[in-house]
Amino acid sequence: MRAYLDWNATTPPHPDVVVAMRRALEKSWGNPASVHADGRLARAEVEGARGSLADLLGADPRDVVFTSGGTEANNLAIRAAFPSGGPRRRLVTSRLEHPSVTRVAEALEAEGRADVRWLEVDPAGIPRLDDVALALASGDVALVALQAVNHETGAIQPLRAVAPLVAAAGALLHVDAVQAAGKVDLPEIALADTVAVAAHKLRGPKGIGGLVHRPHVQITPVLRGGDQERGVRPGTVDPVACAGLRAALGRAADSCVQYARMAARRDAFEAHLVALGGVPVLPADAPRAPHVASLTFERWSGAELVAALDLEGVSVSSGSACSAGTVERSPVLAAMVGAERAGRGLRVSLGDGTTDDELDLAREAFARVLARVK
Ligand SMILES: Cc1ncc(COP(=O)(O)O)c(C=O)c1O
């Protein structure tokens, strides 16, 4: 047996999702753009998923664009606010965002389409609200990009406070809701102009997500091709993935209730890690998702701990990516606690399928690993 405690990286497909996808694979494999009966069967899967995604955010199904996941949805939404050939305008965001936001911001700046204003970061893992107000007061802001829940720390972002400021400044608000959908019920996400979602974070399949937008927002295509998704995102939409997305969304409200009940178990697990020497990254009173614990440990790099725990049957994440033999530190933790401590970060994320047996196994594995003399 292993303990999978990396639900922010991805989630195991829910049995209902597997059943829905298997059914669609056998019956609805047609091209959803075809007018014949086989095409219509496939199209029904696509439109069913579109309706479910629209419902999640109280949007019109016509304002849903299917994407390959959260990354593509973030790219589409942010690029749409800075059309090529348009005037250079301001993009306000922070280093707490996922790379599918921060790297688009950097690219738009390099392309001469945007000036990026990086917000100052509060110890609670959110941008500083006074700095948001200051950034908006500077004028000419086209877009503010702010996630709903942080992927590394679980910090719940201040959408309720930020959304009215953005609206008053006449700017658009893009919300990356990838780590919130199906996990944390945040009605304030609906205050956004554009919202990104990824199926695989809420027990759906990989390879599908969506961008939901308000009717006044015009999305411009990044790819060129056919007329699928009204030409905004050309390419054949996968009806099987849509069936899985729909099944996952169908249980999203229930799963948020289950996640909400998880806080006590997460707190107990985190207390165990603190007793073993872990230091939480967020202050105790910071609003955060009920299933995430982010800590640093003396003498261990996050990457070393991930490897040692893996050998003990526990899957967790360090927030650091290894590339070409070097470990890149989590930009989120670096922005919050500095580069040195960021290198020692470890993220534990539970899910609605996490069992007590898994947590017991993980408790013992952490105790064994952290007792080692290094
Ligand atoms: C907050 C956030 N946004 C976007 C993404 C990217 O989503 P995807 O993997 O579906 O491209 C992730 C993935 O970890 C994420 O955590």
Image (spheres, rainbow, N blue to C red):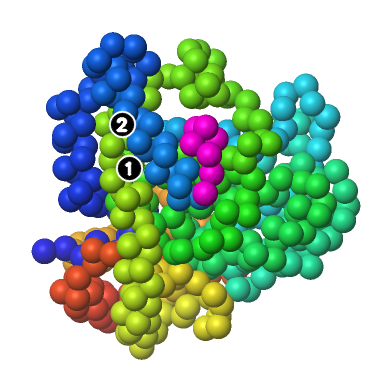
Say how many tags the image has: 2
Magenta residues?
58-65
Where does the C terminus fall, quadrant-wise? bottom left
Is residue 217 depicted above or below 304 in this figure? above
Q: Position of residue 259 (x, y in %)?
A: 35, 68
Label 2: how many Cα within 10 Å (few below 14, some 14–19, many 20+): many
State the separation of the CA atoms marked 1 and 2: 8 Å
Tell me whether circle 1 and circle 2 mark residues in contact (CB < 8 Å): yes
Amino acid type at mark 2: Glu
Amino acid type at mark 1: Arg
Look at mark 1 in the image and give the residue it sits on: 246
Look at mark 2 in the image and give the residue it sits on: 45
Q: Along the horizontal axis of the image, is 181 left or right of 143? A: left
Q: Position of residue 6 (x, y in %)?
A: 32, 60
Identity of the residue drawn at 38% across and 77% down: 263
Q: Residue furthest left?
A: 1
